Amino acid sequence: MTQLSVNLNKIALLRNSRGRDFPNVVEFARKFIGLGVPGITIHPRPDERHITRQDAFDLKTALADYPEVELNIEGYPSDDFLKLIEQVKPHQCTLVPDDPNQLTSDHGWDFTRHADELDTILKRIGDAGVRTSVFLDPDPEQVRLAAQSRANRIELYTEAYASAHGTDRQSEVHEQYRAAAALARELGLELNAGHDLDLDNLPGFLTIPEILEVSIGHVLTVECIEMGMPTVVNRYLDICANSA
Ligand SMILES: CC(=O)[C@@H](O)[C@H](O)COP(=O)(O)O
Ligand SMILES: NCC(=O)COP(=O)(O)O
């Protein structure tokens, strides 16, 4: 069964737009957990445009009340970010190759260029007792290289899957993900996935076997506005429970 990790970036974005602590990120984490969500994801960016460093500490403290709930922190491995990970010690850290000013994550790691620096970084995070995951395109060469690294998991970057969904490229693109996932499993990598997943495209994606975790935030937040949190969370949990 796939675990749902709700990404709270967009709750923080709303909060930051008014300069007071509303909506409160920790309170929303508690609401999602209360509805049965087993994981929380945040992606603190250097400009703190949504999630702040303080949010990471506050969530870590709050999640002590829910030992079964996983905290996943995503981000570019700057020294600041790595220090944050060493202090907060989330269950999982997902490394993303984002520029500081990037609008959103739009590509996976290139291990042909970054294998050496990632080795040092993955060791540092692993030594802090934190599970590691690396954001990756569904590219067989990158999957092979990631399998030779210290990463425990890969997170398949699903934007291409989401944009092809419902178009005549759907099955071709889906096959790329299916093949990358099969190769990753064969090489001993565990698998997560995320970016632009939603209630409509997730069931098709989760026909790929053994996706351990999906992190979802942007569309999920909009779906909650449209349909209400309980309905949306129940539908996601249902889809995840029926994954391959
Ligand atoms: C790493 C990843 O997949 C992203 O989806 C990310 O967490 C979203 O970041 P923004 O919310 O800043 O677009
Ligand atoms: N890792 C992906 C994530 O956390 C959320 O992505 P999105 O649903 O906000 O596109």
Image (cartoon, rainbow, N blue to C red):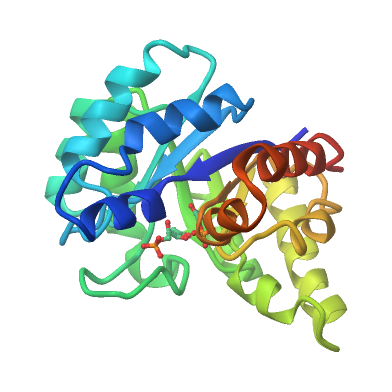
The answer to whether one can see residue 92 in this image is no
Assign the C terminus to one quadrant of the image: top right
Which quarter of the figure has residue 182? bottom right
Assign the N terminus to one quadrant of the image: top right
Answer above or below: position of 52 versus 162.
above
Along the viewing direction, whichever of 109 and 199 lies nearer the viewer: 199
Along the viewing direction, whichever of 49 and 160 lies nearer the viewer: 49
User: At x 78% / y 58%, what residue is drawn?
Assistant: 205
Along the viewing direction, whichever of 198 and 207 lies nearer the viewer: 198
User: At x 51% / y 38%, what residue is drawn?
Assistant: 152
Answer above or below: position of 9 versus 163.
above
Along the viewing direction, whichever of 128 and 10 lies nearer the viewer: 10
Which quarter of the figure has residue 213? top right
- Give the farthest residue toward the bottom: 168
Answer above or below: position of 166 versus 234.
below
Q: From the viewer's perspective, tell me whether residue 241 is left or right of residue 163.
A: right
The answer to whether one can see residue 98 in this image is yes
Q: From the viewer's perspective, tell me whether residue 214 is left or right of residue 174.
A: left
Residue 154: percent from left, percent from top: 55, 50
Q: From the viewer's perspective, tell me whether residue 85 is left or right of residue 138.
A: left
Residue 47: percent from left, percent from top: 15, 61
Answer above or below: position of 34 versus 212.
above
User: At x 64% / y 60%, what residue is drawn?
Assistant: 197
Which quarter of the figure has residue 143? bottom right
Picture quarter with ligand 1: bottom left
Residue 27: percent from left, percent from top: 37, 30
